[in-house]
Structures are given as C-alpha cells and as structure tokens.
Amino acid sequence: MTEISTLERLAPRGSLQRFTLAGAFNSVVFFLLWECIRFFLDEDKAGLQTAWAISWGATALMAHFIHRWFTFDNRKSMQWTLGASVGAYTFSLTGSTYTIGLFANQTGDSIRLIGIGNMVLWGLIIWAIMRLFVFQFSTEQD
C-alpha cells in the first residue's frame, strides 16, 4: 500500500486546487512584469493592453512547463502539450487583453484590482482548456 502525500490528498493532480497553487506563482510573476512594463508606457488603453499582452505572452511558456511538471503530468508528449498550449494561451491572451481594455478608463488601484479579477477569470478558463484539451488529464493511469 502506498501512502498519499498531504499535497496529493488536498490538491490532487489535475485539480483546480493544484492549478491554483501553480497559477499563484505564475500570476505573481505576470503581475510584477505587467506593473514594470506599465511604468514605461503611457497610461492609456493602448499602453495598458500592450503591457498586459506582453506579460501574458511572456509568462505563458513558463506556465506551460510548470503545469506540465506540477499540475498535470507528462503522459502526453511534450510536442503535443507545447503545441496545444500555444493555441490555448493565444486564445486567453487575446480574450484577457480585450477584457482588460474594457476597463482602461480606470486608474491606480482600481485597474490593479480589475486586473487581478481578469487574471482569475481567465485562469479558470485556462485550467479547463489545459485539463480537457492540452493535457487531456484523466485520474486513471494509462
């Protein structure tokens, strides 16, 4: 009989809980990068969306590898998961950049809070896409 770790019990592979743990790290990196890039750009809609898109795209590749190693598993080939995740992250990059642009008239802490909400919303969408289509995760061993 094998013992299940506390992490595996509380946040099993493929679960939203485990995705959230990894996503929290990815999100902190994304948010810091977004803030840094915004510092150098105009505080208009184009600057806000440009900083968002660059940050989202830059952290997407990192997120793929973290989710492959920590959240899901490597049952699917690297070629498959990397290729499929490009489509998933392109979709989420486009959608999240569009939605943050809807609130471009907000300033200061308001846009930061909206940005966090936007990140969480699109994070849930990405979790579903990654679980169902990219990693095609199943709790059964192949």
Image (cartoon, rainbow, N blue to C red):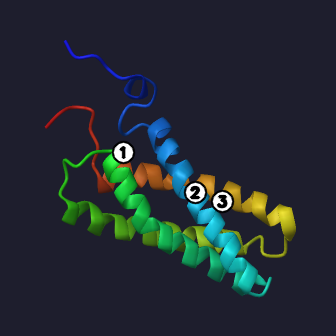
As drawn, is 83 to the left or to the right of 48?
left
Neighbour tally class for label 1: few under 14, some 14-19, many 20 plus, Cα within 10 Å: some
- Give residue 101's position: percent from left, percent from top: 70, 75
State the image coordinates of residue 33 (x, y, percent, origin top left): 61, 70
Numbered disc 2: secondary structure: helix
Q: Residue at x 35, y 36 (%)?
A: 13
Label 2 sits on what residue type? Ser
Mark 1 or mark 3, which has the lower sequence index? 1
Picture residue at 73% right of the left edge, 86% below the top? 41
Which image quarter: residue 65? bottom left
Counting residues from the start of the chain, the first of labels 1 and 2 encountered is: 2
User: Which mark, residue 70?
Assistant: 1
Q: Which residue is mark 2?
A: 27
Q: Is residue 14 above or below residue 29?
A: above
Up-down: is 91 above or below 38? above
Label annotation for residue 5: none
Residue 75 is situated, as x and y percent measured from the top left of the image, at 19, 47
Relative to the observer, which residue lies in front, 91 or 51? Answer: 51
- Distance, label 1 to label 2, CA atoms, is 15 Å
Q: Residue at x 44, y 72 (%)?
A: 90
Q: Are marks 1 and 2 in contact (CB under 8 Å)?
A: no
- Determine crowd level at label 3: few under 14, some 14-19, many 20+ residues with C-alpha closer than 10 A: some
Which circle's residue, 3 or 2, is located before the other in the chain?
A: 2
Q: Is residue 87 visible?
A: yes
Residue 123 placement: quadrant = bottom right
Residue holding disc 3:
118
Picture residue at 20% right of the left edge, 66% below the top: 79
Which of discs 1 and 3 lies nearer the camera? The answer is 1
Residue 122 appears in the figure: no
